[in-house]
Image (spheres, grey):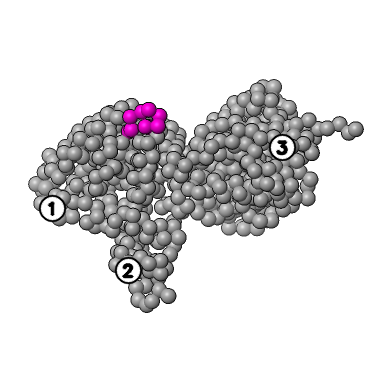
Amino acid sequence: MEPTTPPLRIALAQVDTCVGDVAGNAATVLEWTRRAADAGARLVAFPEMTLTGYPIEDLALRASFRRAAYRAGDDLARTLADEGLGDMTVVVGTVGARPIKERPMAALGSPSRPTNRAIALRGGRVVASYDKHHLPNYGVFDEFRVFTPGDSTCVLDVDGRRVGLVICEDIWQDGGPVAALAAEDLDALLVVNASPFEEGKGHQRTELAARRASEVGAPLLYVNQVGGQDDLVFDGGSFVVAPGSGAPLTSAPQFVPDLLVWDLPARGEALPRGTVAPPLEADEEVYRACVAGLAGYVRKNGFRSVVLGLSGGIDSALTAAIAADAIGGENVVGVSMPSAYSSGHSKDDAADLAERLGADYRVQPIAPMVDAFQGELHLDGVAEENLQARVRGVLLMAISNREGHLVIAPGNKSELATGYATIYDAGSIGGYAPIKDVDKSQVWRLARWRNNHALDAGEIPPIPESSITKPPSAELRPGQLDQDSLPPYDVLDEVLDAYIEHAEGRAELLARGFDPEVVDKVVTLVDRAEWKRRQYPLGTKVTALAFGRDRRLPITSRWREPQEGNPS
């Protein structure tokens, strides 16, 4: 009887990294490799570009950065061996290089071109490497700009088991390395990823992974990055799926670092099932993404606290709650800046919110400063309204400069889309905008979810009920309501979704059955507001198409959607 190959314990290290922190990221690999070894693993895999962080964008073109990453890979291999971990196989993402054959415009005088690489470390050295084949060039991705593709496959021998290795986009495209690996008699296919979160993407990953597992006839192990990096947030959710049935065998929770351990059995034996993390409900996913995005930005940029204007409205209330969950309520400064038109209930709601969150609450009336401006300028109408709004922005920036807080903007996607926000005011000024990619309809849903989550946990809901239920208003003139200037938000957000995320023109919008007057108003508002959006702070991406690097349109443009003719 032939001896059977013993099970191979594999660990997927779902870690949080920071772009450019090569030494810190290497230390993270060392720490989590120790954890994997303590768990009995023989192979541990880290996400895409772990050593460099992801995405590195044009840092990839800087030779000094690439040299530091190369040294870090070699040093890490030696350190692992020195620490008694040399018999482990450690797969880690980094930046590589290939000789230039084509695309000379991108060479910048260098004899080599950067690659998105995964390296395997064992015995104190790099024993294998693999360069990503498919370089995404859509949405938030600019990999084709900075990397050159690989053209070979990689199969690792780990304790006599054959483990194929690919990187992220390689499984999203038909053909390429996965198709080539189908003939390699694999025991497992390992995919290392830095896949940003967006609504609805989770099931796409698992369904695609199941197809690729069947294609190679082996279980697929998918490890994903976690944490916030600028406007991107990575949700983790690493998993293992079976070939054939595509059934999930084990999975890690979302939005938290985790070590997922799974045993690859001997050939012919049943694939074992481990713990499968329960899926998050849609609104909880988005809420936790916003929390992770803000937490990552604050921590990785050296801030300890944030400051924002508290109006008593739903947007600032949700943003403050997200901030409190991200960095602790004691590190949130909320400033009420009432004007002559601020309602009593708005001031009360702001104070109530701050108390619920444990935030540092301050009241700074703006009337004296507005009066000083008016004594010189004598403004009226929209100019007077905008003056009030901008004074609030100046106040927040002054407090930030004096005390070192990061100013966060509470504007939502619906306002940003239509330009329904005063540029440089308290709703648009600052360094980060946590709900920038959340439309107004979802703002209410997230607030409801957060309050219900608190009630389920036996806690006091963080957001006052009246902030959720009262009609939204900028309160810059008597009796002002958002709906004086905009269509009802449920209608507005449907039109915006079709026009922005699905790139539908006027004819397609009318064919959907939207009112022509509403369509023309919304389209005009969106097209005219591009200049405002360019000046807005970055914020967490949660939808398939966020303002910023997802959607790139000229500011100076005379294109307008044709308004004549029949949509059919």
Q: Residue at x 27, y 57 (%)?
A: 486
Mark 1: amino acid: Leu
- Compared with 490, 271 (above or below) is above
Residue 71 at least partly seen: no
Tell me the kind of residue under disc 3.
Leu
- Marker disc for residue 516: 2
Residue 455 in magenta stretch: yes
What secondary structure is found at the residue carrying circle 3? loop
Q: Is residue 276 visible?
A: yes
Residue 379 tag number: 1
Image quarter of residue 336: top left
Picture disc at residue 256:
none
Which label is found at residue 271?
Answer: 3
Q: Nearer the viewer, mark 2 or mark 3?
A: 3
Q: Earlier in the sequence, mark 1 or mark 2?
A: 1
Up the image or down, 88 lies above or below 150; here it is above
**Which sits earlier in the primary sequence, circle 3 or circle 1?**
3
Residue drawn at the location 33% of the way across and 55% of the way down? 490
